[in-house]
Amino acid sequence: MHGRFNEFSGTFTVDKAKPDKSSFEMTIKAESIDTNVKKRDDHLRSAEFFDVKKFPDMTFKSTKVEAIDGGFKVTGNFTMHGVTKSITFDLKGGKTIELKGVQRTGFATAFILRRTDYGINALPEGIANDVNIFIGFEGTKK
């Protein structure tokens, strides 16, 4: 099953000369889950899964950023379903281009989260505990 979240926001600061001064933050509205099946989305919003009334947001805030070939290794606190855990992932990209007079910088990453690590224990037959996460984003220079 594939899904996405349609409502999210974030900020990032990149200092290529001093990567440890870089930072990444993101907020995802759990209610915006979209698997293209309304009944399934409603179930995922329920207390059995995301419990969006009690835990409306998922958040990430970096605590450490290191330069790696092709991007950054980012460590930070990810909070979902009321549980905060430190996660680390490779963030690829970081090239800046100018489109119509606006500078844009983009990144992408992929990693795996385990539902049970975040207290989402409702795993009926056929639903995996490991969830493949794909994130792509771009920002404009202020």
Image (spheres, helix red, strand yellow):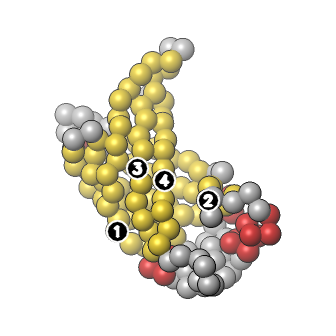
Question: Which class describes the residues within 10 Å of circle 2: few (<14), some (14-19), or many (20+)?
Answer: few
Mark nearer the N terminus (2 vs 1): 2
* Residue 45 position (above or below residue 25): below
Nearest to the observer: residue 79 or residue 117:
117
Q: Please state the horizontal and vertical placement of residue 5, each as a whole percent of the image.
A: 62, 55
Mark nearer the N terminus (4 vs 3): 3
Using the numbered discs, state the Cα–Cα distance from disc 4 to disc 2 in whole angstroms.
Answer: 11 Å
Using the numbered discs, state the Cα–Cα distance from disc 3 to disc 1 in whole angstroms.
Answer: 16 Å
Q: Quadrant of residue 31?
A: bottom right
Q: Please state the horizontal and vertical placement of residue 85, each as a whole percent of the image.
A: 39, 72
Mark nearer the N terminus (3 vs 1): 1
Question: Which class describes the residues within 10 Å of circle 1: few (<14), some (14-19), or many (20+)?
Answer: few
Q: Secondary structure at mark 2?
A: loop
Please name the residue that numbered disc 1 is placed on. Answer: 86
Q: Would residue 114 be found to the left or right of residue 37 on screen? A: left
Question: Which class describes the residues within 10 Å of circle 4: few (<14), some (14-19), or many (20+)?
Answer: few
- Residue at the (49%, 41%) spot, across then down: 137
Q: Secondary structure at mark 4?
A: strand
Q: Secondary structure at mark 1?
A: strand
- Identify the mark at residue 2; answer none if there is no mark: 2
Please name the residue that numbered disc 3 is placed on. Answer: 109
Mark 4 in CB contact with mark 3 (< 8 angstroms): yes
| Amino acid tagged 4 | Phe
- Identify the mark at residue 73; answer none if there is no mark: none
Please name the residue that numbered disc 4 is placed on. Answer: 134
- Residue at the (32%, 61%) spot, across then down: 88
| Amino acid tagged 1 | Ser
